[in-house]
Image (cartoon, rainbow, N blue to C red):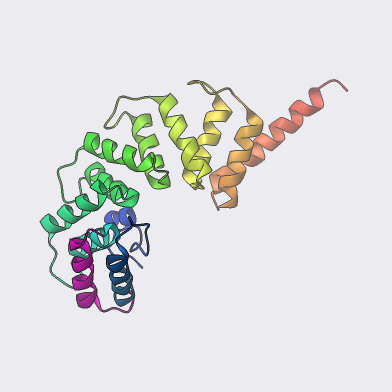
């Protein structure tokens, strides 16, 4: 169930954040936030909006993020980009990794703000350093493209591999291609490449399935050439 509107912005935000670890002393605000989540899921947007705002005023990061999403999407109220951005930034500055990723995606895509990949890079890095898989992939793409940061294939590989280990299908395929081709500090290893292609194929990537089959045949041929 998406908080944001259709299209790229919705996919950037993902679903309404359902729960998050909050600092001690936030028990009351956390309980109110969970009540707001329940009201949102029940379609009581106006009530949820007020509850998120109240908990956000008490410093709950989850409430700050969800309140921002509702404002940006115009749920329970008219769209309010300025306020939405303000509360999203609050959640990001409070070190909520998903808020950091979404705030970075906003600048990477130019949604609601002037496009600035360099600003996006700073926020993707903050989120990626906390293990946020989507941010790891976004950061890897920036390093590969030289967007918002100097091009650096070695750094791109590091972050693709982290995202791949976190289960991202696209990152698994790209990591496989790094091992298949070698270079940029990566030693060519067809067995490892095949394993990453297999992981992506298992998630439904048809190109990865073909790569897995091709490498399996190539490795089989190499094995036959080896002396008995």
Location of residue 38 in the rendering, given as x and y in whole percent from the top left corner: 33, 75
Residue 1 lies in magenta, yes or no?
Answer: no
Residue 210 in view, yes or no: no
Q: Which residue is at the front of the view, 168 or 224? A: 168
Quarter where residue 47 is shown: bottom left
| Count of marks placed on residues | 0
Location of residue 27 in the rendering, given as x and y in whole percent from the top left corner: 32, 65
Magenta span covers which residues?
A: 41-59
Q: Residue at x 43, y 46 (%)?
A: 133
Q: Which residue is at the front of the view, 173 or 17? A: 17
Residue 114 in view, yes or no: yes
Looking at the image, which residue sits at the far front?
A: 25
Image height check: is 11 above or below 107?
below
Q: Residue at x 34, y 25 (%)?
A: 151
Image height check: is 153 above or below 54?
above
Looking at the image, which residue sits at the far right?
A: 228
The quadrant of the picture occupied by the C terminus is: top right
Q: Is residue 32 left or right of residue 200?
A: left
Q: Residue at x 74, y 26 (%)?
A: 222
Location of residue 193 in the rendering, given as x and y in whole percent from the top left corner: 60, 34
Location of residue 174 in the rendering, given as x and y in whole percent from the top left corner: 49, 37
Quarter where residue 149 is shown: top left
Q: Which residue is at the front of the view, 139 or 123? A: 123
The quadrant of the picture occupied by the N terminus is: bottom left
Image height check: is 39 above or below 105?
below
Q: Residue at x 39, y 43 (%)?
A: 130
Q: Main secondary structure of the magenta part?
A: helix
Residue 52 lies in magenta, yes or no?
Answer: yes
């Amino acid at each position: 169930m998406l908080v944001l509107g259709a299209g790229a912005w919705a996919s950037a935000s993902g679903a309404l954040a359902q729960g998050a670890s909050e600092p001690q002393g936030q028990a009351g605000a956390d309980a109110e936030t969970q009540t707001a989540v329940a009201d949102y899921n029940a379609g009581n947007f106006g009530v949820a909006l007020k509850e998120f705002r109240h908990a956000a005023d008490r410093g709950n990061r989850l409430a700050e993020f969800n309140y921002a999403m509702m404002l940006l999407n115009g749920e329970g109220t008219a769209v309010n980009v300025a306020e939405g951005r303000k509360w999203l930034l609050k959640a990001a500055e409070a070190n909520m990794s998903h808020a950091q990723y979404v705030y970075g995606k906003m600048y990477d895509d130019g949604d609601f703000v002037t496009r600035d990949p360099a600003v996006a890079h700073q926020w993707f890095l903050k989120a990626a350093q906390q293990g946020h898989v989507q941010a790891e992939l976004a950061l890897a793409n920036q390093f590969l493209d030289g967007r918002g940061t100097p091009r650096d294939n070695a750094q791109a590989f590091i972050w693709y591999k982290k995202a791949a280990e976190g289960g991202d299908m696209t990152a698994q395929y790209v990591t496989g291609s790094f091992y298949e081709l070698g270079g940029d500090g990566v030693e060519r290893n067809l067995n490892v490449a095949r394993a990453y292609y297999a992981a992506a194929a298992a998630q439904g990537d048809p190109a990865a399935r073909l790569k897995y089959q091709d490498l399996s045949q190539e490795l089989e041929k190499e094995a036959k050439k080896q002396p008995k």
